Image (spheres, rainbow, N blue to C red):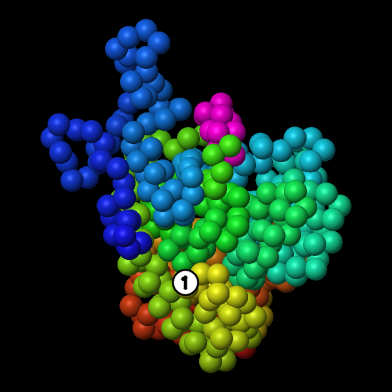
Amino acid sequence: MDFATRCVHTTPRIPDSLNPVVNPLYLTSSFSHTYVGQEDGYSYTRMQNPTREAVEDTIRDLEEGTDCIAFASGMAAIACVMELFKPGDRIVSGHDLYGGSIRLFNHVTAKNGVLVSVVDTSDLDAVREALADGASALYVETPTNPLMVVSDIRALADLAHDAGALLIVDNTFLTPYFQRPLTLGADIVVHSGTKYLAGHNDVICGLVVCGDQGLSDRLRFIYKTLGSGLDPFDSWLLARGIKTLPLRMRRHESNAKELALWLLACPFVEEVLYPGLETHPGHELCKRQGDGFGGMLSFYVKSEKLARSVLTKLHLIMFAESLGGAESLITYPITQTHADVPPEELAQKGIDGRLLRLSVGLEEPSDIIYDLESAFEAARLEVGE
């Protein structure tokens, strides 16, 4: 069955005598039992709920995993995965990650006695060297947030497994529509489902998909113990968003390609970071290990003053955190997504006051371009550049 058809029809029908086309929403905290010692499938929504289970089954199928667990946020999902590790364990992490993941690793994971070593995961020799000191896991984003660095998932899986480590891949930017890391050897895939999977900037959720039932059993024990499962209403909204995932991802990508080409020719822009450009160093790798390049791009403008001014001159594109929704959103990583990253780390990564990140929405691309063009011109007059 085609991916698009599975997005619409994979979700299992929850038994209901009225035979609704759309699965019902189970807004209940508890389920009664017929007999002592018999749960009839469900007992307490913190542990499982039919509405949550249905969307988990859909995403498990789309990622081609053995199980999917839905969480109250993307960070809750990653935090649960980190609970697999004990004091003294070591994790090798990509050097360019979402700022919230860096904050978790630096302030919570490290506090719990798990050592986190940072490496450029696009450099396989550097990864091999980092893993040689012993590691329990390798954690990677590809493409990365916000610098759009692409890493070789299959090669990283081989390196991790040779070292006795798990490979954990954050697949938020590309989604299973464009990239399925489990089929390339990853052990765990995480998502901020808030973004493209839900797709409408109205849900906060996270997902963990496992390729191994043993890992899933351990994670389900942790998630029910911590109480971080996704609530039924947001599960229902997530399921609704998944139905249009292929349509949205194709539009996001086509818009992003058009925007990237326009930005390349823009006199106020110094560099465009988008894997869909043939000049991007990860372009061919992205093509080999997936089916597309997504709707996220970043770019450097000529000065920090210009960047800050542009952000106040936009009208259609909203200056806001998050990504993956219908609306185009522009983010200033140095003060928003990466505000808690130490300045020396930001400098090493190349995240400075000239960098802007754009989540290209579903609007007509000419309107997005016109908004940027007008904002650049107004900013030029304001800052005198």
Q: Is residue 179 one of those drawn in magenta?
A: no
Q: Work out whether residue 152 or residue 271 is closer to the camera in this orientation and state it.
A: 152
> Looking at the rendering, in which quadrant would you find the C terminus?
bottom right
Q: Secondary structure at mark 1?
A: loop
Q: Residue at x 37, y 24 (%)?
A: 42
Q: Residue furthest left?
A: 18
Q: Quadrant of residue 283?
A: bottom right
Magenta stretch bounds: 215-227
Query: In the rendered image of this protein, does residue 42 appear above or below residue 59?
Result: above
Q: Amino acid at mark 1?
A: Asp
Q: Could you tell me residue 195's position as x and y percent?
A: 46, 56
Q: Could you tell me residue 150's position as x and y percent?
A: 63, 70
Q: Is residue 219 one of those drawn in magenta?
A: yes
Q: Could you tell me residue 301's position as x and y percent?
A: 62, 81
Q: Could you tell me residue 241's position as x and y percent?
A: 34, 54
**Magenta stretch, main secondary structure class:** helix
Q: Work out whether residue 214 or residue 42 is closer to the camera in this orientation and state it.
A: 214
Q: Residue furthest right?
A: 133
From the viewer's perspective, is 4 left or right of 381?
left
Query: In the rendered image of this protein, does residue 373 appear above or below residue 89?
Result: below
Q: Which residue is mark 1?
A: 291
The reply to whether residue 291 is in sight is yes
Q: Residue at x 53, y 59 (%)?
A: 183
Q: Residue at x 38, y 37 (%)?
A: 53
Query: In the rendered image of this protein, does residue 268 appear above or below residue 160?
Result: below
Q: Residues within 10 Å of mark 1 (few under 14, many from 20)?
A: some
Q: Residue at x 27, y 52 (%)?
A: 9
